[in-house]
Every structure is written in structure tokens, then in C-alpha cells.
Image (tube, rainbow, N blue to C red):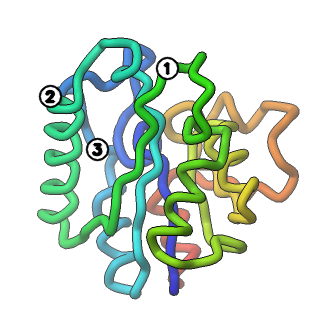
Amino acid sequence: MKLIVLDRDGVINYDSDQFIKSPEEWKPIPGSLEAIARLNQWGWRVVVASNQSGIGRGLFGMDTLNAIHDKMVKAIGQAGGRLDAIFFCPHAADSPCDCRKPKPGLFRQISERFNVDLAGMPAVGDSLRDLQAGLAVGCTPYLVLTGKGQKTKDDPALPKETRIYADLATVVADLID
């Protein structure tokens, strides 16, 4: 099985330091929706793994998160693509949960749900914690320079095996061409 794990904010859509708190604030990064569609056309399963601490902080509720994800799924569908699943951590940063990246809980859930070993599978993110969570289960880390990626690429803790790309579209072009 060809499976790729994508972070949401900063990879598929523009990020915000104030969080994406409504469907109106969710805006796709140019080329990201078409990149997901290309992955699907080449037989890839596409899964999102995202920290959504805005829920735990009380900034928005599950109904709003569902509306944001509904908008994302519809936009990807209009571009000819689909997501196979969306996994998210709703907990605040100080939570002792195992699902908040950089902890690998979301990735373990993905592995269990799809009954697949994630070793070598691409994990695409714009922050160090995205890459660390994927690495913890053996994923290959891909950093995109969208979102927080420009800042992340200069982090001394960036794993040496990280592959760096301008955006999701260039990651996908490299994976399928």
C-alpha cells in the first residue's frame, strides 16, 4: 500500500498563529488540492494527521472542526481528489495525551486503522513536531517550506534525513514522477 500522511495547516491550507477557527478561515495553498488528486490518481492513500488544540483551548468546538474538514474534503473533491481519513488531536499543549504531535499516537492510530507498517512512508509537515511524530514510527520526513517550514528548515534539531521541498505539489511531483 502506498500511503502518505499530511499535516493540515501549513501543508494543505494556509496556517495562522491565531489558529484556523472557522471554515471561512480555511484557505488552500495553491496547488495543494491538485497535488492530493494526483496522489490519488497514482494509487496513493492520503491521510491527514493534525494537532487541533483550538478545541482543547475552547477556541472552537467539534461542530466547527467538522465544518472546516467538510470544506476541505469538498474542495479536494472539486479538484478530483479525496482523503482516506482525517486524524486529529483535540488536546491542549499541556495535555498528557499520546496523540499530540510530536508524540506518535496519531501515526500509530493510522497504522492500526490501515493495518500497515508506516516504515518508509512519507510524512509531510511544516513543523519539527510533524516530522518527529512521523520519524517515531519510521516514516520518511518531508518538510514543506509553506506554513512554518521556512523557520523549521533552520532549526538545529531538524532530522538530517529530512527531505525539503517548496510545497506539497513539489513533494508529490517527486514521489510520482
Mark 1 and mark 3 lie on one chain; the one further toward the N terminus is 3
Describe the element under mark 1 as helix, strand or loop: loop
Q: Residue at x 42, y 62 (%)?
A: 47
Q: Amino acid at mark 3?
A: Pro
Q: Amino acid at mark 1?
A: Ala
Q: Position of residue 142 (x, y in %)?
A: 65, 57
CA separation in Å, label 1 and label 3: 25 Å
The residue labelled by disc 2 is 24
The residue labelled by disc 1 is 92
Q: Residue at x 41, y 43 (%)?
A: 88
CA separation in Å, label 2 and label 1: 23 Å
Q: Position of residue 18 (x, y in %)?
A: 38, 14
Picture quadrant where residue 84 is located: bottom left
Describe the element under mark 3 as helix, strand or loop: loop
Q: Residues within 10 Å of mark 2 (few under 14, many from 20)?
A: few
Give the label, 2 or 1, closer to the camera.
1
CA separation in Å, label 3 and label 2: 11 Å
The residue labelled by disc 3 is 28
